[in-house]
Amino acid sequence: MTMAFVLGNGRSRLAVKTQDLGRWGTVYGCNAIYRDFLPTVLVSTDTPISARIQEQQINQRCQHYTRRPLPLSSSQRIPPDYWGFSSGPAAAGIACDHGSELVYLLGFDLGPTQEQRFNNVYSDTEFYKKSSATPTFTGNWIKQLITVAKKYPQTVFVRVLGENSAVIADFGRLSNWADLTMSSFLDRINTGKGL
C-alpha cells in the first residue's frame, strides 16, 4: 500500500520525529516546515512564504507546489482542483494525486491551544501570527479535507490526534476516514506494525 504523511503545522506535530517518516512513505509538508525539516514535497499557498521558499531556492531541494511560481522557478503550480485550498488540504490532495492509498494527517489540529490561542508551530515568527493571537478559523480547512476525501473514496485518511486536536464530527461521517491517537501512531511508527 502506497503511504503518505502530510504534515500540518499544528503543535501536535512536535511529538513526531519527522525525519523518521520517510522510510515508511512519502512526506508532504506545508509552508515554514522547511526551516526544521525538508519534506519530499512542500506546499505553500500564501504569497510571501511561497516567494521566500523560491528566493532561498528551497524549491531546488524538494518538489514545491504553489499558486503562482516565480518566473524561471522550478516550483510547480498547484493543481486546479486545489487552487483555492489552504496549504494542508492542498498537500493532502496532491498526495492522493500522486497515488497514495493511505494518508496520515499529522499536525492538523484544527483547533486552538489549551489556552484558546493560535495553534501553530511557527507562531511568533516571520509570516505567522503571534502565539497570543486568537485562533484561526478552520471551517474552510475542514470542508477542503472533506472534498479531498470524497474525491478519493478508495484512499484511507487517518488523522492523528494530539492533546490540542479538535474533534470534528463531520470527519466521522466519511467511510474512508479514521482518527488515531498520537500514542497509537507513535507505536505504529516505532514498531512498523499496523501501518
Image (cartoon, rainbow, N blue to C red):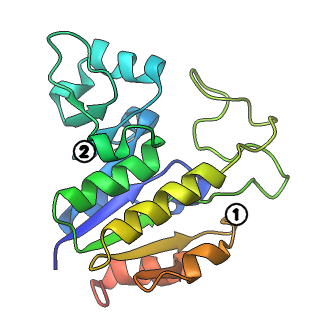
Residue at the spot 60% in from the left edge and 25% down from the top edge: 125
Q: What residue type is disc 2 on?
A: Val
Quadrant assignment, res 152? bottom left
Q: Is residue 56 visible?
A: no
Give the farthest residue toward the right: 115
- Compare residues 11 and 74 and report the one nearer the observer: 74
In the image, residue 180 above or below residue 33: below
Disc on res. 164: 1
From the image, tell me which residue sits under label 2: 41
Question: Tag 2, which secondary structure?
Answer: strand
Asked whether disc 2 touches disc 1, contact meaning CB atoms under 8 Å apart, the reply is: no
Give amino acid for label 1: Asn
Residue occupying image coordinates x 21% and y 57%: 97
Quarter of the image for residue 123 reads top right
The image shows residue 6 at horizontal and vertical percentages of 37, 57
The answer to whether residue 66 is above or below residue 110 is above
Residue at image position (85%, 53%) is: 115
**Side (left or right) of 187 relative to 14:** left
In the displayed structure, does residue 186 sit left or right of residue 100? Answer: right
Residue 179 locus on image (x, y percent): 52, 80
Query: Who comes first in sequence, dot 2 or dot 1?
Result: 2
Q: CA distance from mark 2 to mark 1?
A: 26 Å
Mark 1 crowd level (few <14, some 14–19, many ≥20, 10 Å Cα): many
- In percent of width and height, residue 35 lies at 41, 32
Left or right relative to 152: residue 169:
right
